[in-house]
Image (cartoon, helix red, strand yellow):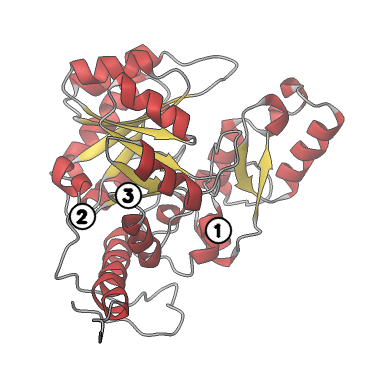
Amino acid sequence: IARLLTNHKRSVLHPTPLIVRMPIKTKLTEALGIEHPLIQGGMHFVGYAEMAAAVSNGGGLGTITALTQPNAEALRKEIRKCKALTKKPFAVNLTLLPVVTAPDYGSFAKVIVEEGVKIVETAGRNPKKFIKFFKENGCYVIHKCVAIRHALTAQRLGADMISMDGFECGGHPGEEDIGNWILLAQAARKLKIPFVASGGCANGAQLAAALALGAEGMNMGTRFMATKEAPIRPEIKKALVEGDERATTLVMRSVGNTERVYKNSAAEKVREIEAENPGDFMAFRHLVRGENYRKSFQETGDTKSSVWSCGQSMALIDSVPSCKELIGTIVSDAETIIARRLQNMVVKSKL
């Protein structure tokens, strides 16, 4: 296995190049026809065609986030744009979350099928209708879950694979606060369908560990935000590089829709309001509007004025490589750990 990696901290501008000569083959790579067992998960105001295509062209599975688009026809255009940017497989994420005004999920789902997308990442509550719809139309469905009981339900409903999302994740970790060290081991014991690790994932050591725990690959969100192709302001990427495992916080716990976000003054204000008015979403709604962090991501780069999702994996981010470089680094590091470090720990008995 070729490994061109130094021990010093990689430069933000000049990540160490890697050559991957022995790709890791798993049920994920085999089922989806991708080179490496890495998925870029759905991310609001990040999962555009350019992002998805860059990941897919790098050998992973890129994902367009449906609800980042204002309507189903805009999603259609985004899917077509992605098709023009890559000939490799990509997915579309459809997340079902409790919101004041629900989008027309049905029209989004219809466009996904009409445009011939064959891989769908579903997430959120009550997925029965949509898992059934996508399966009836020949799609491979990866359902993201934060609890084993939810994964078992998705399995019963017909999902092909589970993305097991630990409490470390950015965005919505659910209300049960279970980390991946337990979730993945439990998934391997309980599930009959394959699963991937999601939440807090960022490097090759974690990919090797996830495979050892029974996963077929790894889903990353925050780590892909800190790449050259990620369509967000450089100030946001810089914040991810400089952040550590303490740089996130949890908001909206009092309304049963917990979200892990960047720890800043806007998030702290939400927490203060929740402490004073638990369960009153309208009291802090103005602070958690998606438009606020769209402006931060795409216009101002202001890391402090909005509530924006990210995970604890930022502790493991020290560079802003291209998607291809990042994928190559992760897979090469995992290969080295599996083929060298772990193999050398197994010794023949002298008895």
Q: Residue at x 44, y 53 (%)?
A: 225
Q: Amino acid at mark 1?
A: Glu
Residue beneath label 2, please? 59
Q: Earlier in the sequence, mark 1 or mark 3?
A: 3
- Residue 340 can be seen, yes or no: yes
* Residue 66 drawn at (x, y percent): 37, 28
- Secondary structure under tag 1 reads helix
Q: Residues within 10 Å of mark 1 (few under 14, many from 20)?
A: some
Foreground tag (2 vs 3) = 3
Q: Amino acid at mark 3?
A: Ala
Q: Earlier in the sequence, mark 2 or mark 3?
A: 2
Q: Residue at x 56, y 43 (%)?
A: 178
Q: Amino acid at mark 2?
A: Gly
Q: In this image, 217 relative to 33: left or right?
A: right
Q: In this image, 220 relative to 102: left or right?
A: left
Q: What is the C-alpha distance between the residues marked 2 and 1?
A: 27 Å
Relative height, residue 273 to residue 220 (above, below): above
For the residues bearing labels 1 and 3, Cβ distance under 8 angstroms: no
The numbered mark at residue 235 is 1
> In the picture, residue 120 is in which quadrant?
top left
Q: Residue at x 19, y 24 (%)?
A: 115
